[in-house]
Amino acid sequence: MEVLPLTVRKVIEEVTHFVVENEKDARSFIKRMNPKKDQDSLTLYPLNKFTLPEEILTYLDPIQEGITMGVISDAGCPGVADPGALIVSKAHDLKIKIKPLVGPSSILLALMASGMNGQSFAFNGYLPIDKLERKNKIKVDFEHLGISDIFVQDNHSVSEQTGTLRGLHFQVPPHAQGKLVRCGRGSIFDVAVDIRRGSPTYGSWVGYELTAENGHQLYIPGGFAHGFQTLKPDSEIVYKCTQYFASEAEGAVRWDDPDIKINWPLNDISVLSEKDMAAPFLAALDSPFAWDGV
């Protein structure tokens, strides 16, 4: 508790309305964080697995009246034994501003605050504190999926308009990126194109629809160009990368290359950057990637 950031202490100091999983523990936590706070000034709303959905909605009334409300929830198993996820989900549906603060459940609540479906997640335990042990644990978890690289960067972008198209992008070695792509909200058509010289599938493409509901992810290794088209408004694209972004290593291939012939779902392209519009065709690409037989 002593290492909680000032932001959390500030909330405890200023807020008087809290949704809590356990009233006794919540009062003890608040007193520990701010011994001078008047306990009689607190308004606590119980929230647990026995709370009815219609009751949860009434808890949001003070927020809609302009009152800032905090949520104090045990870690438990996010989305299962963590009722805090329930009120965050309801608040998001009503477009109420949510600010997740540090805590064991804050990662899931932050994802849900961005519109993701918390029910599609499972909590598999905490990573080791030791950096090397943590790295090895992550490596083992992904190796059974055929992913041997370690992810070093997470990217998150939002495209407001349906029909927004980005791509086809890649980074040249030694900055070549593998990407694990998912859709946090809305729907996208995600595409990978083989640009490895000598590959029997050179110039071929695959495409999959990724949505917040289906929870599917697409891994795109180095040696492939990546692009996507949004199928719904306000779609969020979240992807993990095996190398950091390096502007000097950027490369691209035209999204409408006649040799690749990608069958984009939507004919109407609402947003396309000038850089993507000016990208070279595959025939003019001197690919820095070579097929290694795999």
Image (spheres, rainbow, N blue to C red):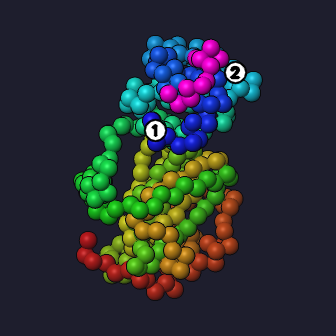
Q: CA distance from mark 2 to mark 1?
A: 30 Å
Could you tell me which residue is drawn at 42 percent across and 47 percent down? 216
Could you tell me which residue is drawn at 55 percent across and 47 percent down? 187
Give the mark toward the camera: 2 or 1: 1
Which quadrant of the figure has residue 193? bottom left
Q: Nearer the viewer, residue 11 or 173?
A: 11
| 39 drawn magenta | yes
Which quadrant of the figure has residue 275? bottom right
Residue hosting label 1: 2
Q: Pinpoint residue 11: horizontal percent, then vertical percent.
A: 61, 34
Task: Give the mark nearest the N terminus, 2 or 1.
Answer: 1
Q: Amino acid at mark 2?
A: Pro
Count of marks overlaid on the render: 2
Answer above or below: position of 5 versus 247. Answer: above
Answer above or below: position of 271 versus 73. Answer: below
Q: Residues within 10 Å of mark 2 (few under 14, many from 20)?
A: few
Which quadrant of the figure has residue 25? top left
Q: Secondary structure at mark 2?
A: helix
Q: Is residue 252 left or right of residue 293?
A: right
Q: Quadrant of the N terminus?
A: top left
Q: Pinpoint residue 294: horizontal percent, then vertical percent.
A: 26, 71
Q: Residues within 10 Å of mark 1 (few under 14, many from 20)?
A: few
Q: Pinpoint residue 242: horizontal percent, then vertical percent.
A: 40, 65
Q: Pinpoint residue 67: horizontal percent, then vertical percent.
A: 71, 26
Highlighted magenta segment, given as a residue range? 32-44
Q: Amino acid at mark 1?
A: Glu
| 76 drawn magenta | no
Among all residues in the image, which is located at the extreme front? 36
Could you tell me which residue is drawn at 66 percent across and 36 percent down? 97
Could you tell me which residue is drawn at 75 percent across and 23 percent down? 65
Q: Which mark is residue 62?
A: 2
Is residue 156 something that shows in the picture?
A: yes
